[in-house]
Amino acid sequence: MENLGDILKRLADTRRAANGENGDFGNGSTPEEEPDDLCPSCRGRGWVTPQVPVGHPDFGGVVACHCQATQTAQDRSERLRRYSNLGHLTRYRFESLNPQGLIDDIESQHMFSTAFEAAVGYAEEPGGWLALVGPHGSGKTHLAAAIANRCIEDGNPVFFVHVPDLLDHLRASYAPTSEISYSDLFERVNEAPLLVLDGLGTQSSTSWAQEKLQQIFNHRANAGLPTVITTMIELAKLDPYLASRMQQRALCRILEVRPPHAGGQGQSHRLGRVEPEMLRRMTFEQFDTRGNRSSSQQQASLQSAFEAAQGYARDPDGWLTLFGETGVGKTHLAVAVAAERLKLGMTAYFAFVPELLDYLRFTFTPESRVTYDRVFDQIKNASLLILDDLGQENTSPWAYEKLYQIVVHRHNARLPTIITSMLDLTDETGPISSRVQDPSVGLLIRMDAPDYRVKRQRGGNPRDRRSTR
């Protein structure tokens, strides 16, 4: 899956191609796909704003473009997922979430259960706004992403964005070299049929950032466009203008997913932990090296990765890096290694890279109960560190610097490390990729096979389904 920057570049390329413009497409060539099949009404977005007079029920709203009716269900779903910007969050479903959450106390379970039911209902019929409030690790993002994924399954467009990333890209769109104009990106957010704003309140607090968010909130509130918001910040501490929109009872429903006194059991308690459900499903026994209608060569790549992971689980020495497209089983094998080490009484530190960086940012805030230095040292020196989905987070120099420090330390000390990535790390350059490619430290294995999830989407015997990515 693409990150937001890649999606914006592709959109800019498509727009220029549709307008018959020539120019640099990032690699000195023209786009691979001709714009002949690009819908002239929606230009590939899948939705349009009806041209109706003021006062009409559809004025200011959005509807599915007529081109959607001509697509197959699978093509439409894939197109909507590309548009959604969900990336690695496509695996966040209601089915993989405990309806009572992960905290044992009754109050927390009741609050999460209420939020879960509300999220399911909202996904079935999006309308108005839904705000999910709670500390890190409380399940807000999982619920928001599950809403988005359910809507996509139903054929409804969604745009999901982490608020700090959105502001970074809006700033970058002012540059002469930007692949997409500010107005195009701003319209994309303003007019999205369903917008998910994840992590409100974690952005830099500048007058410019406040102004942009106020404009987005004002437009979507006035138009009554469905919007889901997640935040770990109490409403009283948010920008008063944003909070006032969220507190309009006729517009927005606010749900807390954990009581304030449970905050100490949040992400700081769960950081590095492998979820029990993942340990149950992602074992070596459940990994299918036959793949999903894979060729003999593709099966060979899966077998090679499987054997390397099994050997590494017996003796974690150096690094093991697994890379390939989404759904090939990278995380499955990484978790299987962790499961074997845990059975032996050893430890394994599992870090989904985008969430890890979010938490490192959070440790700088007054709400954090742990210091940045303590967490960072714990990650750098873990006896076995699993960095899952490396490459989906590089949206800022700060994020790259933190990863660089972790990678350099563990490379120099040759500490056992497993990395999974969708990047083709054989072609990547840079200080992080250089260390990943170092043959004296570890193995770099490509997993080249079709997406396992496609098979599950098409049906089949549930007993034969594999939970792999």
Image (cartoon, grey):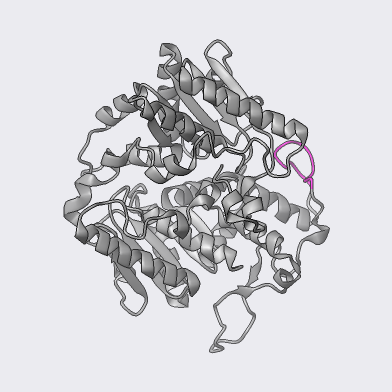
- Residue furthest to the left in view is 261
- Residue furthest to the bottom in view is 55
Question: Is any part of residue 190 visible from this angle?
Answer: yes
Would you say residue 113 sits in the magenta stretch?
Answer: no
Quarter of the figure with the C terminus? top right
State the predominant SS element of the stretch in magenta. loop
> In the image, residue 339 lies at what x, y percent?
42, 32
Choose between 275 and 171: the one closer to the eye: 275
Which residue shows up at 42% across the image and 64% down it? 228
> In the image, residue 143 lies at what x, y percent?
41, 58
Q: Would residue 360 be found to the left or right of residue 226 on screen?
A: left
Q: Would residue 455 be found to the left or right of residue 247 on screen?
A: right
Instruction: Report how many numbered discs are placed on residues in the image.
Output: 0
Say if 100 sits above or below 284 in the image: below
Q: Quadrant of residue 134?
A: bottom left
Q: Would residue 465 be found to the left or right of residue 351 on screen?
A: right
Would you say residue 25 sits in the magenta stretch?
Answer: yes
Choose between 37 and 382: the one closer to the eye: 382
Q: Quadrant of residue 53?
A: bottom right
Residues shaded magenta: 22-32
